[in-house]
């Protein structure tokens, strides 16, 4: 081989490397349900179980040490994640949805999926939706030959396989697109769980609601004959892997986006028998170990397919841990919130500071961390930045791109303060090391220095008037302007509501 030909070959190989580096990455977003900050062993040195797949994500990618979900319960957090807009700006001010109702995401609202689809991605969702769907007929009087509407396929996803909501709400079946593979024509209710103090959704099932035994005094729900709660994680992971495999085989040049929201460790805690006895935190620890196992399956699959280098894997949770965190501290000395206060539904850090990892070997320095505040609402602007799209004023109103921090974690982002929101409607604002919790009902203001007091034990309200006034002025503007980002003022869906105690009606 002469030197001229060798040089051309080297230049060709280098150009191919640079071309691949600039190619839009595949994106996989894994979302757990009720997993606390302390339920990842790399974040909690005192954890009573190991999460090697999550540890691997952190070791090979970036950890957001101050990462937050946008709300403290399922439905509003998922809205914020997918739209880049706080859910409390909608008509949903408190709590969560049942399985059946109009979707919280309007058809014309830009989502992670629609943004990427419009920029050349194949998009898929596998797992738990919990943002509302419209089903044919009414309870006990369904026509399952008719399609489900107002669901993931209407919000930017090309493919959907999963379940409508949390397992305690029904309607429970394995939905493949707009139809249940096996229709939910039977009925059941919560059964007692011998591995955790919650419940199970498992056979036997009954043919009418009246026949359903209710040991936990709960209402009957509709269910398919082949549905079993403990199969969710395996089925979801299998379907996600199968879809990626088919897509990369049929259209290797087209990037993909997979949203994979698991049902764990949300109740029912139902680990497969192969995980029984693992860890030292009872059934909950077993369930988290199984969850981590399935995350590892995804990572191993990417390695086997040779596509890990340019695949951005994002992992986080929709809110802090369920109330059984108290029992785990007492029984197993495992704190699912780690050093943070309380858990799911709470305005304190344990309610909304969650595990948040990103791995993208082509771009993100391995083993890095970003200590500035970050929100799950930031994903929309981040994805737009990655694909070179510009968001309009009515898109991702609460979303700030994290891309610069992914490439250089030491870089300070121009990130506006974030707002946290409890399930009872109470607000808080975090800006740097300070957090101001707003009054609500009979509850007064609270102020904490999170850098010195991450457990929120020492209320400093009344001792730092300048900081208090600045934060109150800022959260008021963020609420009233309909956005936390720069841009034209937008409208909230409701102009004022009673949780805005500190703002005059």
Image (tube, grey):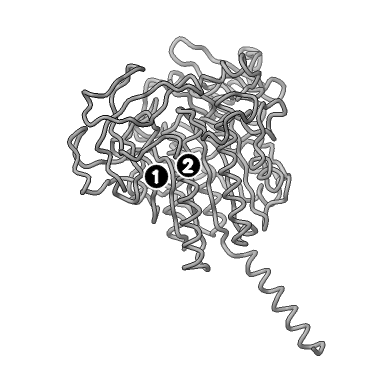
The residue at 68%/47% (across/down) is: 61
Q: Is residue 364 above or below residue 24?
A: above
| Residue behind mark 2 | 261
Point 67% across, 55% down: residue: 361
Label 1 belongs to which residue?
Answer: 162
Q: Counting other residues with Cα less than 10 Å from the Cα at mark 1, is it few (<14), some (14-19), or many (20 or more)?
A: many
Residue 140: which quarter of the image? top left
Kindly report the distance in space between the C-alpha atoms of the residues bearing marks 1 and 2: 9 Å
Report whether 118 appears left or right of 102.
right
x and y, in percent, of residue 490 in the image: 41, 40
291 or 279, which lies in front?
279
Q: Where in the figure is residue 91, as x and y percent of width and height?
A: 34, 32
Of the residues under marks 1 and 2, which one precedes in the sequence?
1
Q: Quadrant of residue 349?
A: top right
Marks 1 and 2: CB-CB under 8 Å?
A: yes
Q: Quadrant of the C terminus?
A: top left
SS type, badge 1? strand
**Quadrant in which the N terminus is drawn:** bottom right
From the viewer's side, name the closer residue of 429 and 452: 452
As drawn, 485 above or below 333 = below
Name the mark on residue 446. Answer: none
Left or right for 330, reference 69 = right
Q: Position of residue 417 (x, y in %)?
A: 58, 34
């Amino acid at each position: 081989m002469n030197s001229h030909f060798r040089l051309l070959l080297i230049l060709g190989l280098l150009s191919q490397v640079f071309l691949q580096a600039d190619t839009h990455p595949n994106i996989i977003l894994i979302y757990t349900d009720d997993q606390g900050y302390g339920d990842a062993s790399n974040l909690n040195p005192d954890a009573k179980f190991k999460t090697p797949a999550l540890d691997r994500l952190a070791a090979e990618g970036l950890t957001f040490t101050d990462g937050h979900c946008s709300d403290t319960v399922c439905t509003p957090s998922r809205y914020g994640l997918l739209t880049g807009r706080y859910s409390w700006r909608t008509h949903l001010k408190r709590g969560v949805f049942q399985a059946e109702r109009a979707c919280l995401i309007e058809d014309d609202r830009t989502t992670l999926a629609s943004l990427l689809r419009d920029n050349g991605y194949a998009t898929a969702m596998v797992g738990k939706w919990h943002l509302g769907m419209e089903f044919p007929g009414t309870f006990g009087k369904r026509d399952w030959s008719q399609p489900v509407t107002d669901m993931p396929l209407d919000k930017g996803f090309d493919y959907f396989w999963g379940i409508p909501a949390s397992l305690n709400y029904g309607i429970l079946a394995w939905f493949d697109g707009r139809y249940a593979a096996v229709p939910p024509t039977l009925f059941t209710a919560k059964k007692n769980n011998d591995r955790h103090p919650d419940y199970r959704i498992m056979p036997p099932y009954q043919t009418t609601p009246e026949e359903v035994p209710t040991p936990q005094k709960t209402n009957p729900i509709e269910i398919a004959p082949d549905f079993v709660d403990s199969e969710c994680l395996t089925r979801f992971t299998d379907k996600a892997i199968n879809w990626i495999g088919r897509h990369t085989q049929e259209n290797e040049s087209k990037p993909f986006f997979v949203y994979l929201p698991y049902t764990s460790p949300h109740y029912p805690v139902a680990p497969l028998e192969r995980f029984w006895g693992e860890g030292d935190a009872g059934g909950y620890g077993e369930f988290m170990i199984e969850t981590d196992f399935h995350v590892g399956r995804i990572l191993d699959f990417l390695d086997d397919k040779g596509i890990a280098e340019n695949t951005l894997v994002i992992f986080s949770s929709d809110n802090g841990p369920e109330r059984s965190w108290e029992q785990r501290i007492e029984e197993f000395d495992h704190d699912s919130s780690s050093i943070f206060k309380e858990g799911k539904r709470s305005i304190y850090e344990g309610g909304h500071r969650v595990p948040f990892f990103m791995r993208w070997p082509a771009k993100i320095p391995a083993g890095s961390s970003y200590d500035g505040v970050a929100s799950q609402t930031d994903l929309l602007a981040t994805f737009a930045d990655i694909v070179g799209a510009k968001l309009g004023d009515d898109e991702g109103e609460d979303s700030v791109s994290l891309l610069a921090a992914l490439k250089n974690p030491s870089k300070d982002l121009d990130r506006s303060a974030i707002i946290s929101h409890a399930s009872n409607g109470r607000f808080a604002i975090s800006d740097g090391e300070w957090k101001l919790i707003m009054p609500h009902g009979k509850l007064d203001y609270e102020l904490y220095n999170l850098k010195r007091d991450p457990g929120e034990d020492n209320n400093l309200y009344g001792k730092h008037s300048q900081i208090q006034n600045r934060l109150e002025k800022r959260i008021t503007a963020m609420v009233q302007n309909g956005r936390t980002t720069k841009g034209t003022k937008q409208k909230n869906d409701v102009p004022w509501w009673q949780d805005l105690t500190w703002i005059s009606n």
